[in-house]
Amino acid sequence: MTRCIKHAALFCALLLLALLVNITRVQVVQAQRYDDNTANRRLVIARYGRPRGAILVGHRPVTGSRDTGEQLRYERTYKNGPLYAPVTGFASQVYGTTFLEHAEDGILSGTDPLLSPFPLWNDVTRAQNPGGEVVTTVDPAAQLAAYEGLGLRKGAVAAVEPSTGRVLALVSAPSYDPAALSGNGLAVERSWRRLNADPDKPMLNRAVRQTYPPGSTFKVVTAAAALDAGVVTDLDEPTRSPDPYRLPGTSTALTNEGDGCADVSLREAFTWSCNTVFAKLGVDVGVADLAATADGFGFNDAGLRIPFSVARSTFDTHVDKAQLALSAIGQYNTRATPLQMAMVAAAVANGGQVPAPYLVERTTTAHGRTVASPGVRNRLRAMSPSTAVRMRELMRDVVERGTGTNAAIPGATVGGKTGTAQHGIGNSGTPYAWFISWAQGERDVEPTVAVAVVVEDASADRTDISGGGTAAPIARAVMEAVLGGRERR
Amino acid sequence: MTKPGTTVAAEYEESPKPWLSEPADPSAPAPRVPRRRGIELALIVVAVLLSVFGYCDVGLAKNGTVPPGAAGYGAGLGVLALLAHLAVRRRAPCADPLLLPIGVLLNGLGLVLIYRLDLETPGHRAAPAQLVWSTVGVALFIVVVVLLRDHRVLQRYAYVCVAAALVLLTLPIFFPAVNGARIWIRIAGFSFQPGEFAKVLLAVFFAAYLAANRGALAYTGRRIWRFSRLQLPTGRVLGPIVAIWLLSVGVLVLERDLGTSLLFFGLFVVLLYVATGRTGWIAVGLLLAALGAFAVGTLEPHVHSRVEDWLHPFATIEAGQGPNQLSQSLFAFAAGGILGTGLGLGHSILIGFAAKSDFILATAGEELGLAGLSAIVILYALLVERGYRAGLSLRDPFGRLLAVGLASIVALQVFVIAGGVSGLIPLTGMAMPFLAQGGSSVVTNWIIVALLIRISDSARRQHNEVDDGQRTP
């Protein structure tokens, strides 16, 4: 009997041993797989279990956290939510995250392994780091100027620092308060439905996710291509272009808003925005060179991230000559985001180099230790430095005596280009008013701000819409804010 | 003490302790067995302190303060444990000193876990009731230790026990099913599971019957084949016990209490094997178990779904219906990892309504981690091992079989439920001894520990008596 009791004991021991082996399998070997299962709510509970790190604008947090005591505990709050919504995006328990809240989620929620001082040790203890902070490049004064400048009109503003690519302002109007999407109550669901049903699309980030026909502002690209390709060598030489200009291979005649565009110099054509001259120039330069220059400015690049992705601006290369002529004046399939057009202005201001735009100055731990700082990265050269010098001259003329006088700032050097983009079937839509510009303060050695403004105001009188009248004052306000900020500093 | 396997196995590879050798060599002068009540007391203090620390830890983690009831809880558990200790000291002075502290620690830990889960379900508190049932359990423990002077008395009541067990098992049929199983009796707001008590009664009956008939079972009857070693006992001897076993398992299947029927089956096979010493019984047992499991698993829809859940724990997730209890349990275990999240910091409440009862081990796994869970399994292993040890050192077959039976009940129960919630075997509803919420279970397990105390006391006292006898012939 003793032998049998011992066998039975061994049997019990084996049962319990099997238990231990299986528990080890579940808790150690399979643990990661179970943790990562999408149906496992622990990840999302842990995510909202601590206050989210702050997003900083001008050294001040524009976000906060509210403790609800519920299962998904901390809800995001926003200061000046509508003003910064295109930068921060929202962080919702129900609807996820967008823009910086999304792109820097690892840092903000504390899950980024870079946040832990001893990564391996934290893996063992499963300690959770408090959320880190994201310091943005946004200039609060410029952001506010752009937001107030747009006012109740639909549109967007993007401003960058030409030498570095730091994004100084990113505004989209109409906007919304991301705080309305924080949490997981019924009110959040109602806000979500209301915002999505709104015909004005307040959640659309027009500055980076909407492309518009750039209209005449694209003439900056065409002019740079013409100068770089040697099609035009002297700014003041007549361009031998007819008015009206018959689009090659068609019977369609292209005209201008004003008179006196026939056979004018590039300088005059640029200053007064002659469509006929630039349409012909585009055809003269040819699709290859024009496309190469456009690509150099950043068109057709689907991979741009600042760190959230920016919609692709397009310059179509599969075109006949008539389409190329239209493309060269920013129509046909040419489309650009406001940020892309700010990059165009910045390239001119920056001696032909296009700075890679970025929105995050650096990310830090909750205790202020820097985790990462993207720094300045230069993209490809858009044009030669000598072309850039001449382009600056052209853009300055626009503001000093051309269509963009509304952007002039006393005591500062300002270059700009207006644009009025036709769109809709048979150009039936209300045209978009564009203005792109850069400005250099009296005591600055180089331009310190480049801006793109687009206003898609449906309520304004159609004849009143022009880049110079509607968009230029907004650009001026933004540039003044940046220059003024530098003066004060 | 790293693995339970080595714990038990190592015991009998060591040079045999004097009270372990069977039958005691009358010529060998053995020293008087130390009573070790002081060690028991010290271990009880440690067990109570561990529980109180756990209680404080939960409060600190959840609210940042020591819970207001910490002192009361500690005092209550301490007084209960002390009373039990005094009873053992008075009435079973030679008993194994590990049994009671293990019971106290597991019960205390269970109360902590239930209290911790109560914080997530403010409308439904289970810890106070569990504390009351624990008190009843300890009270019954004391009653058993004080009133039952010799375990052999139970042998006389074998048929009373089996009658009572069958009545208890049958009763729930007349009460409504709860969560698919008809295993509850509800009287005046109180509910209990008679199956829990029935297993102790059945263990007593099996032990008594097999002890009385083991000779006939082992050595009479016909061989199945001419050369086979398996001898079929005569129907007259085997008949009654098989009938009783079939009856109880049948009733349980009717009540859909799968865990307990599995337990009864295992208990029956183990005791039959130990009593007759015939390996063939194990083969027959395993064969029957496999056949039965296959038949029930394919034919019974309730069981079939459990088997499906076991094979595909994430099927409901893939079907878009969200995680089921088992996958939530697996998530909880995985979330604990090696060191656990810490008491009060896990989310095992996601498991749902059974988190405090059947799935209590998932909370332990998540908040105490693999480290804490291993400690708990080792505590059970020690309890089982101590039961077997008492059985080995006894000389009367009934006592030996009873000790083996009671220890096996604990082992099988732990295996079935822990294996179920951790995905080792299909899930069958059963209570984790001492840990899980459930009055009948706590009370029954205290009675099991009381009986083991009594048996281990007898086992070691026998040797002392023999020794005394030798010294004063």
Image (cartoon, rainbow, N blue to C red):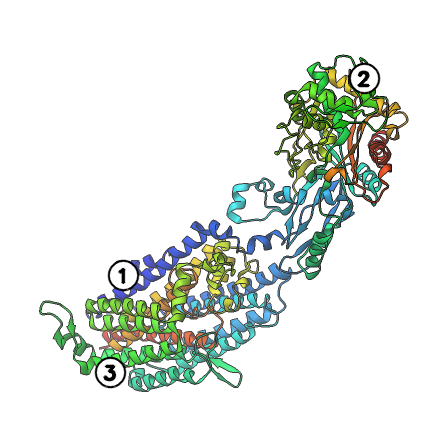
Name which residue type carries label 1: Tyr
1 and 2 marks in contact (CB < 8 Å): no
Asked whether residue B158 is in view, the answer is: yes
Give the image quarter of residue A262. Answer: top right
Residue under circle 2? A263
Above or below for A392 versus A54: above
The residue lying toward the viewer, choosing from B257 and B300, is: B300
In the picture, measured across the screen, residue B460 lies left or right of residue A178, that is left
- Percent coordinates x, y for residue B459 in the rendering: 30, 73
Chain for mark 2? A
Residue under circle 1? B12
Name which residue type carries label 3: Pro
Farthest residue, direction front: A251
Tell me the SS state at disc 3.
helix
Name which residue type carries label 2: Asp
Compute the Cα span from label 1 to label 2. Answer: 111 Å
> Looking at the image, how many numbered discs can be counted on the residues?
3
In the picture, measured across the screen, residue A282 lies left or right of residue B385, that is right
Tell me the SS state at disc 2.
loop
The residue lying toward the viewer, choosing from A300 and A100, is: A300
- Which dot, 2 or 3, sits closer to the camera? 2
- Which dot, 1 or 2, sits closer to the camera? 2
In the picture, measured across the screen, residue B190 lies left or right of residue B90, that is right
Asked whether residue B379 is in view, the answer is: no
Let me know if marks 2 and 3 both belong to one chain. no
- Percent coordinates x, y for residue A338 in the rendering: 73, 35
| Residue depicted at x 77% and y 29% | A216
Give the image quarter of residue A308. Answer: top right
Residue under circle 3? B240
